[in-house]
Image (cartoon, rainbow, N blue to C red):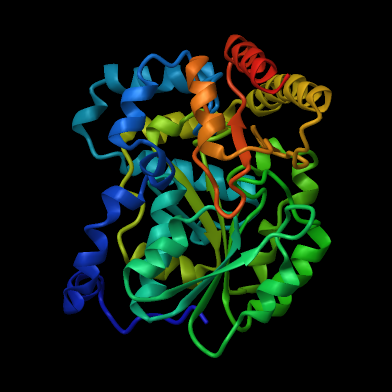
Amino acid sequence: MFTPLPLSRRQWLISNGATLAGLALTSRLMNFEMAAQMTPERLAATLPVRARLSLNENPFGPSPAALEAMLRNLSAGKAARYPYGEVNELIALIAKKEGVTPDHIVLSVGSGELLETVGVQFGLQKGEAIYASPGYLQLPRAVEALGGRGIPVPVNAQLEHDLDAMAAKIRDRPTVIYIANPNNPTSTVVDPSALATFIKEVSPKALVFLDEAYLDLADNYAGRTLVGLVHADRNLIVARTFSKIYGLAGMRIGYGVTSPKIAAQLRNYGLGSLTGPSITAAVASLRDDGYVAATRAKIVAEKEKLLALLRELGRPYAASQTNFVFFQTGREHAKVAAAMLAESVSIARAFPPMTDWARISIGLPEENALARAALRKIFS
């Protein structure tokens, strides 16, 4: 269960020195994906890269309205003022979008800050984090850093979360179940009906952290999001980010939707210290009604070109519902990554245990064309 720690915010930060030690890892954990691949050797090798297709960014960038809002914020001298009023405006807009009241919303520095805060709490309780393998590791790594245990559960034959196997791993101890839907790196989604049933059944025994960072890129967003389940005060957090479809990865802004009780506890740990330009960019993004659909259409069109090539080359791939594709290379990842770098294209790191698969992000049309030419050369 997600039980409150018997600590004030100050005590939480200094208790036993363990939390300080754990939080000292933040600089490495907060950007886990980037840190995992940008070793000094790899960074040196990627300097001349013409197509960086490794971090699942939205290459089309923010909404023009968001860019204008950021510039207006800075030019109006607001950098010298705390953005309290803007924060309240953003929370109100998010609450309206999600169909909840503002006390259900927790802002965070990207969704990563929320992932780590939850992970630290379960680590301090010597709890467990159940997650898909391969999967995104920021939350389970934070649990492990503070003395808890990560429990990987292999994805099923369709490269989706194996919900039954995950439920079977729950024991009588503090437990968080991390579900990225769509999953990173496999790009797959879980059937919404099955996932809703799973959450209802396991949330009395464990906190479910549902990461919908990429869901705006999937088909039928409205039919797939399960944010409505927070209304029953379940042990559920639904995480969102402005880093993906909204093109604001560099601005570091995200949020969680959860019960008012859990939201209040998370706020007590000091989440969501956002900058004024980030806040104004997020507000403008939410008000730009046409941006998401138009940007998703461009990403999907480019993705279809890549999938067509993979079919032509006979390379199996996962059913992608994201802005990246996970495909089977039939070779060790290091060799494929090196061959792509030789063609001036960087792809994502390896994702054990599936080391003969590769993840490649969708970039700008010219970047994607370069990547397709490289793949054709390598696999023809």
Q: Residue at x 71, y 73 (%)?
A: 165
Residue 66, position as x, y percentages in the image: 48, 23
> Left or right of 55: which side holds 183?
right
Q: Residue at x 65, y 63 (%)?
A: 154
Q: Is residue 62 above or below residue 150?
A: above
Q: Nearer the viewer, residue 343 or 215?
A: 343
Q: Nearer the viewer, residue 199 or 99?
A: 199
Q: Residue at x 45, y 60 (%)?
A: 139
Q: Is residue 292 visible?
A: yes
Residue 178, position as x, y percentages in the image: 57, 63
Q: Quadrant of residue 314?
A: top right
Q: Is residue 297 above or below residue 359?
A: above
Residue 171, position as x, y percentages in the image: 57, 87
Residue 283, position as x, y percentages in the image: 49, 33
Q: Nearer the viewer, residue 373 or 31?
A: 373
Q: Is residue 45 above or below residue 151?
A: above
> Left or right of 145: which side holds 164?
right
Number of numbered discs = 0
Instruction: Locate the C terminus by quadrant.
Output: top right
Q: Is residue 62 visible?
A: no
Q: Quadrant of residue 133?
A: bottom right
Q: Residue at x 70, y 58 (%)?
A: 226
